[in-house]
Image: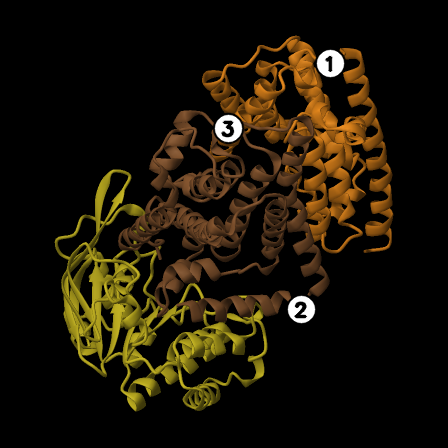
Chain colours: A brown, B yellow, C orange
Amino acid sequence: MIRIYVLLAWTWTRAAAQYPVSFALMTAGGFVVSGLDAAVIWVIFANTTSLAGFGLPEVLFLYGVSGLAFAISDLLFSNVDRVSQHIRAGTFDVFLIRPVSSFVQVAVDRFTPHRIGRTLQGAAVLGVALSRLDVPLARAWMIPVMVACGIVIFTAVFALGGAAQILLTDAPEVANAFTYGGAMLTQYPLSVYGESVVRGVTFILPLAFVNWQPGLYVLGREDPLGLPYWVRFLSPAAALALALAAALAWRAGIRRYRSTGS
Amino acid sequence: MIETEGAGRTFKVRGTVVHAVRELSFRVEAGEFVGCLGPNGAGKSTTIKMLTGILTPTAGRVSVAGLDPSRQRTALARRIGVVFGQRTTLWWDLPLKDSFELIRLLYKVDRKVFRERLDELCALLDMGKFLATPVRQLSLGQRMRGDITAALLHAPDVLVLDEPTIGLDVVSKAGVRDFLRRVNAEHGTTVLLTTHDLGDVERLCRRVLLIDHGSLAFDGTVADLRAMVPGETSIEDVVAHLYLNSPGSPRTPPDRRPADDPPSVTA
Amino acid sequence: MAGAFTNTVFGVMRAYVLIALWRSRPGLGGYDLADAVTFCFLSQAFIGPMQVFGGGLDLPQRIRSGDIALDLVRPASLQLWTLSEDLGRAAYLFLARSVPPTIAGALLFGIVAPAHPLACAASLVLGVVVSFGWRYLVALASCWVLDDRGLNTLSLVLTTFFSGLMLPLAIFPGWLGTLARALPWAAMVQVPADVYLGTADLAEAFAFQALWAAVLLGLGALATSAARRKVVIQGG
């Protein structure tokens, strides 16, 4: 499956590489556009030293992890939110007659390599944040775990959105509010938000496990919601659970798939 | 090779349940060349989609090459080739040969075997001139030949075609028909073809299935088909008669009179 | 409908961030907490009519297809005619996409009522005109620039950041703040929002918007005749 993805992604990348200037500009553009959110944080901290109890390097750390995880998920899988276009055009049927997972095919179709600009931006901010923080090595191991789990969680949200589009052919495309909205939500410490929101993203849609809960461990901070200490280590479990839910939803979508008339 | 038993598929349309396919049972043995007829909306496409794993039956059982199409979709995909008349299976923006190369990689076909097969198919279908052209710039006839090639590159046991000659000019149609006959005769590939073109049926199919209102209205040879309506000489009239008088079906609504869906030979 | 839902969700999230900021710096930028929250939902409401993320015009499509040549030979002013279309679209989007998030904001957080409703409406219209002026120039630029994606990205960055959509310009530090308040994009979100909240001097606000509207429309007229020369006379 990975082999097929890489193969198809490489085909699209080769096609994009035929226009190197355009590619470079689009990558830079992606860097700048996603960098606006970091600029917002910078402006906020030009006016205060602490936001909901967190300082600038800590907020940049949370932003960087979420941003990097989301950017990678966006690069690899966000095309999944265009399933409904494929269904309408009939190309989804074509995916189903190939000996490849339909999810992989939808995800890699029109692979857009210049989205890497966004990834570079997230990595840059994370780098800056880590240089300003003093994370003891004993806790730093959690950081790659956070990014990996974050990628899985965001991908699962994209997949759930896609599955919803397969199941409900006339569904309004509200998935964006959850995917890009979720990305924006996790840019800030969850202590910024109201309690109902935090509960929602901890227990219902586990976005809190992208960067917040494990982040509390890395930063050595108290949980404002008062959840037990071991919750900080639940990211892999949350990622797995959500991924499972997404896989089941996708399967259910395929089983109930109606195709077009002809 | 292909077997359905009481297969059915329902859809919920604005609250009511519509039976697109109902109690469909037939068997196709390996190496047969079967034509599938039926008026528009009869359930032919739905049947094809159930056979190829695109749709899951809501009732009954479907088996192709010994596999359950909806549960063993990817395994089945390696054993069947599908051609859609109304959409392409190729990559729109890429040159034709790149599409073929991708298919080789997706289906894991051995490079040497692939080369031989591609050369053979290109020669038979005369595709040398436009292998480097992006698919979106191909004419319908060229694209159809590309799609058929794409469906056969992995040497499937079964070839399913959904209205492959639609919109083709007379020469292209003859070329495609000739080719399909050879594939069936020389390689023993089982072919299932849905069409509105009775010329396809007469020239190619030893056996005809007529699907109407979701069920099998007829299963037999072309000669048997003619015998169904004695007194009619042209096969078009025979089929038209059968479409209008299918038993146990609700009265055809006015907008589906024969003038609107003539089972004719013209493109 | 999906657009209104997304605007609402983003509005709610940004509101929380602003609340956290205002809690640590009450009265920041001359706004109190209620003002800040209202500002947030107003900016979300303006996304539709002002097309803050770009778009809303057929122009780029017509330029790509070459139909623009037909438009340019007509005696009617392309710019004015496109403007009237845009105003119509803005009116529709105001009802479809602006009202729902505002109501949501009012119910969830409570927002303040407009200080001068009529002035606010006028400022809104001026804001749409300024937004149009800018988008028109960007769209027309694709007559000269082959790949308009870079231009669109640049426009997106400038508009979202300097309109006040992300944060009120009042809190931009130092020279950045001064610059931001002078640029045309401020007329799209910041100024109408301030008029609504009553934190702006009305005369100044209208003058600012009108000035930029005039400048942009003037540049637009120049660009239109340049395009006419290029496309129609030279057959570009």
Give the numbered dot on residue C27: none
Q: Are marks 2 and 1 in contact (CB under 8 Å)?
A: no
- Location of mark 3 (residue): A192
Same subunit, labels 2 and 1: the answer reads no
SS for callout 1: loop
Residue A91 to residue C137: above or below: below
* 2 or 1: mark nearer the eye: 1
SS for callout 3: helix
Q: Residue A89 or A184: which is nearer the viewer?
A: A184
Q: Are marks 1 and 3 in contact (CB under 8 Å)?
A: no
SS for callout 2: loop
Q: Residue at x 50, y 85 (%)?
A: B126
Q: Amino acid at mark 2?
A: Gln
Determine the chain carrying the residue at label 2: A
Q: Residue C26 or A106: which is nearer the viewer?
A: C26
Give the numbered dot on residue C200: 1
Instruction: Please state the total of marks drawn on the protein image.
Output: 3
Determine the chain carrying the residue at label 3: A
Residue A246 to residue B97: above or below: above
* Circle nearer the N terminus (2, 3): 2
Residue C217 to residue A1: above or below: above
Q: Position of residue C186 (x, y in %)?
A: 73, 27
Q: Is residue A126 visible?
A: yes
Q: Residue at x 52, y 48 (%)?
A: A136
Side of C10 relative to C222 (left or right): left
| Corner quadrant of residue A103 | bottom left
